[in-house]
Image: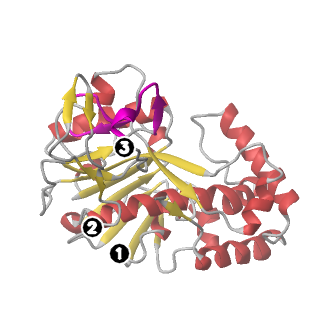
Amino acid sequence: MVRSFSVPQELEQKIEAALKAHFHLTLGDSRKLAEAVKRLSDYFIANPEGSTPWNESWAQIAYLCYFLPLNQARVQAVVKEATAREFFTGLEEVLDFGSGPGTASLALTEQFQKFTLIEKAKDICAKFNFVPGATWTNKDPNVSTPAKTMAVFSYSLTELSDLPAWAKKLEAIMILEPSTQEDGRKLQALRHKLIQEGYSIYAPCTHHEACPLLTQSKTDWCHDRIFFAMPAWFEKLEQHLPMKNRTLTTSYLLARKQKPATKLAANVARVVGDHLEEKGKDRQMLCRGPEREFLAWMHKAGLKQEIPRGVLVEIPEDVQKVSNELRLKSPVRTLIDE
């Protein structure tokens, strides 16, 4: 059982066309592309809170062939979860803050037709035309229908101390952040603030109580993990890089002012940890309330199961609670495709 995402063929074609038109490169120029990627990666390491240097051609090349496909796969996973939770119901417009060339919006074109991309480097990013018909601006947006509009912050909130005032006027907020300890815990703190302000959290949370990863630990942070089914050209590119991307992680939050139409059942929880093999048992952390808890498969019971991080599960009725463990006597049912 694997949660796997790749580069949509249409996006691959758009990336290839942009590389040819603006830089006289193709996706087959692995070594040249890798040089640009390493340069931008080094820039981000040296400037962890800095903005992407869009005015540099090497930064544009690196983003197009590397960071765009990876981030778009991450957004695909969040969009799939949002769709399953009916998060987009009644929404018609997207305001994509710090959009770059439209990475997040590209993954939302099946759910929305109206996009406003908010980007300081709009003149550079707009030339790639990845989201046809989108409105571009580098200023705070004018919102005509806030009750039908969603704000998107995809790897752009790190540059801000709080959500901008215009975003709080909208019905929905979708946030993706790097899955670092600092950014993840910052997002968990923002979750608490949004709940206090009356928002409902659709995902990843299954409850509105205190976040156990924040309150019961000084080091844990909530993040999702997916597999990246990389195309052949990306594999060749990666051969020239020290970074490997078999799996991708991200921290995310889906919040609305409107409450969910369908509540999750009381026995539903989300797996928020990787599979841990320990003496006499296997464990995976899950979240269903303010306690820090683990699913536990005791070896003597003959049960073995590995659940993809980030999915919803139904906890069996015959589970035995021992300290912070939910010891299983029967397999857990995953809701991965529901």
Label 1 with label 2: CB-CB less than 8 Å: yes
Q: Secondary structure under badge 3?
A: loop
Residue receiving disc 3: 303
User: Disc 3 marks which amino acid?
Assistant: Leu
Residue drawn 80% across the image and 61% down it:
236
- Is residue 192 in sight in this rendering? yes
Would you place residue 172 above or below residue 91 in this image?
above
Badge 1 local density, few (<14 within 10 Å), some, or many (20+)? some
Q: Is residue 190 magenta?
A: no
Picture residue at 23% right of the left edge, 35% below the top: 193
Question: Quick one: 68 or 92, which is closer to the camera?
Answer: 68
Q: Amino acid at mark 2?
A: Phe
The reply to whether callout 3 and callout 2 are in contact (CB within 8 Å) is: no
| Whole-number angstrom distance, CA of label 1 to CA of label 2 | 7 Å
Q: Which residue is mark 2?
A: 88
Q: CA distance from mark 3 to mark 2?
A: 38 Å
Q: Residues within 10 Å of mark 3 (few under 14, many from 20)?
A: some
Judging depth in this view, the residue of 91 and 139 nearest the camera is: 91
The part of the chain drawn in magenta is: 275-303
Mark 2 nearby-residue class (10 Å; few <14, some 14–19, many ≥20): some
